[in-house]
Image: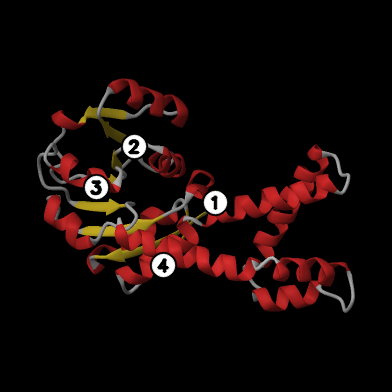
Amino acid sequence: MKTITFIGNGNMALSIAKGLKNSYQIEVVGRDFEKINKFEDELGVEIKKALIDDFNMDDKTVMFCVKPANVEEIATRIRGKARVIFSVLAGTTLSKLKQNLHSHAVVRTMPNLAASIGKSMTTLTGDEEFKKEAEELLGTIGTTLWLSSEKELDIATALAGSGPAYLALIAEALTDGAVKQGMKRADAVRTMCGLFGGFGELIQDIHPALLKDAVMSPGGTTAAGYGALEDGNVRASCIDAVAKAYKKATEL
């Protein structure tokens, strides 16, 4: 079984590792063994472990999962030259990664938290020679899309990377709306979960506008609710959310 080495042991690293643990031997490199051991417990499989100051990444396949602000500091503590580095750092350019980290190749990736259940929407860009490997590796945790530029990947970060938080807000708000009208909380949550589960399947094959039109009868309940969303500038707010998240990605 091939080994994938995680440098960093945060939530994103854990989500990706959960998706890869049945196909790869997981190695985790961190600052202290207590956090690495916790990572192992949450992952549920035995992993290889190393401290950052004792780590040599010669010929390793690395999943780089530290905080963007820590790139320079971590780089001074790593020895060796990696075979390839797959970075999940939002807004951290290929140029910056190559300037700070020694590797034969670098690929930027942007998975999301659905990686833990094999449903991530992961966008990729970087050294073309590793395109196929990147698609196969990240394909084990969901769907992949190779993009032609870092600008597109930063936009995708604002859409798919941050998207689960946007949808969670909408899910919570719709559930609260049902409770406000008199529905029991548990029933409202279960109904919302069923809604999102079915919608996730439908949106794969039906354009959003056509799906909306199929549900909205003239003068009906959906039209009334949809009008309220437009009055609340939900469409404009979603567009603005992607714009501001993209801007933040370019500033990191």
Callout 3, which amino acid?
Thr
Q: Earlier in the sequence, mark 3 or mark 1?
A: 3
Callout 2, which amino acid?
Gln
Name the one closer to the observer, 154 or 2.
154
Callout 4, which amino acid?
Ile
| SS label for mark 4 | helix
- Residue pictured at 37% horizontal, 66% vertical: 153
Name the one closer to the observer, 15 or 209.
209
Q: How is the image coloured?
A: secondary structure
Q: In this picture, is 237 found above or below 32?
A: below
Q: Quadrant of residue 95?
A: bottom left
Q: Quadrant of the C terminus?
A: bottom left
Which residue position holds label 4?
155
| Residues at circles 1 and 4 in contact by the CB criterion of under 8 Å | no
Q: Is residue 144 visible?
A: no
Q: Position of residue 98 (x, y in %)?
A: 15, 57
| Residues at circles 2 and 4 in contact by the CB criterion of under 8 Å | no
Callout 1, which amino acid?
Ala
Which residue position holds label 3?
61
Q: Between marks 3 and 1, how big is the CA–CA gap?
A: 30 Å
Q: Between marks 3 and 4, how big is the CA–CA gap?
A: 26 Å
Which residue position holds label 2?
25
In the image: residue 214, left or right of residue 67: right
- Residue pictured at 16% horizontal, 46% vertical: 72
